[in-house]
Amino acid sequence: MNPLLLVAAVTLAAVPFVQDPAPAAPEQAPSTEPAPADGSAPAAAPADGNAAPAAKAPPPFTLGRTAAKPGKSPYATDTLLDHPPRVYVIPMEGYMGVDIHPVVYERVLRDLKEQKPDLVVFRLSSSDGRGSEKYMEAVNEAQKEDKIDPRRLASGITDYRDLADKLHGELDDYPTVMYVQDSRGISCVYALAWPYMFMAPTARISGLDVVAELGGGNDADIKAKMFSAWTGIAKGILGLGGRPQELCDALVRPDRKLSADIDGRNTKWRADTAGSWYVIDTTDEAAARFSSKLAEDTGLADGVAEDMSDLMSLLGYPEYTTVDSGEKIFRDSNAAWRRRYRESKKWMEEFQEPWETPQELGKRKQILEKMQQAFKQSPQFAKMWEWTRGLTEDQLKLLIEEIQEQIRSFQKQKQGSGGRSGGGGGGRGPAGPMGPGR
């Protein structure tokens, strides 16, 4: 066959598969988006001529995944693994400063490096905050009597900063993602301290303005300096996740506003209410807060995941295996000190019982020495007693010294009375400055 005819035949055969670009559809106003669950609503688009203003439709859930994020991406398309990943889950559950404590994560990090996982997932569920907002909820039924003033939780923010720095330093070589099941109060600094973040459908990120309340006192100058120092530390932790200044300010400071402009897959946060996509915070009374839907729509979150399996699917891993040893270390460690804490409350109830003899006074001293030993063995145990009962290691030392002095006084009385000892009169004995065990 003539080569020229062959080329012509092939060209004609290919024609049906080549289509001209479709004509552009007439420009239509997008439909109105329902208001987010937390009350924030999309801002109306500028009016065009006499047309009624209309709200823009929300961006796709993949908005949060941008090339500008720091850290190793956890997405399957970026990790290029040739096998289902081994996923190491690191729990962050309970109270900041006691359950979420550096002692626990020292053990977890050692185990993680031995396990050599392909992917790390932080799972955060920690709720505290303002009582008026019903944030001050116990982690479970057993903890209801041990509620902690959220300002005490927030006061450990320098420790939280150090832990965040350490976790980043140790894990920056691993693709890492944060999965927020709930975060209210000071734990929000961890929710946003990693750039790749997903949320559960009912999760919230709110109440971080508790940090602004740490600067107290009547001196305006000192109060302003403390306010600046505390909020600066909080914003420094948020900065580890690559969060911009406008967003950090609005999350920490009630007096700051927040809205968002969105260009393609990029979000530009604004410290005002003039954003063309979403207006998040318009009040001076509370800091910015996000429902999972609002976080997804604005790109703060990479997506909303029902559970661990759903999270891994969104990351592009239909198959995976989990390394459970980190969860076991976390639960066993916290269960141990909490068990001792429950026991110690019974010790202190016994300590408060009336005493009649020097021997009973000696038993009271033994109880305090046992408490003192527990304080030294577990910083979480010590912190829980300080936050819930106002009892510190220094106060224990003073109480022991007081009882020791009373024992010496009884011994002197015994020597001076020819062997007869006096009774204690049925008193309750010394108590701590804030009434330990009450």
Image: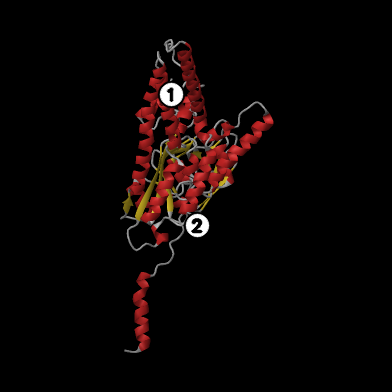
Identify the amino acid type marked 1.
Lys
Figure quadrant of residue 272: top right
Q: Which residue is pictured at 46% across the width and 10% down the height?
A: 417
Q: Quadrant of the C terminus?
A: top left
Between 128 and 250, the one nearer to me in the picture: 128
Residue 266, x across and y down, in percent: 52, 52
Secondary structure beneath label 1: helix
- Disc tally is 2
Between 125 and 404, the one nearer to me in the picture: 404
Note whether 310 is above or below 394 in the view shown: below
Q: Evaluate if marks 2 and 1 touch, with contact meaning CB atoms under 8 Å apart.
A: no
Q: Which mark is residue 67?
A: 2
Q: Quadrant of the N terminus?
A: bottom left
Residue 63, x across and y down, in percent: 46, 51
Secondary structure beneath label 2: loop
Between 276 and 79, the one nearer to me in the picture: 79
Residue 29, x across and y down, in percent: 48, 47
Is residue 37 visible from the viewing direction of this image?
Answer: no
Q: Which residue is pictured at 34% across the width and 89% down the height?
A: 2
Q: Is residue 138 left or right of residue 391?
A: left
Q: Residues within 10 Å of mark 1 (few under 14, many from 20)?
A: many
Figure quadrant of residue 36: top left
Is residue 75 visible from the viewing direction of this image?
Answer: yes
Note whether 277 is above or below 430 in the view shown: below
Q: Residues within 10 Å of mark 2 (few under 14, many from 20)?
A: few
Residue 93, x across and y down, in percent: 40, 39
Figure quadrant of residue 116: bottom left
Residue of label 1: 365
Q: Which residue is pictured at 56% across the width and 39% down the height?
A: 250
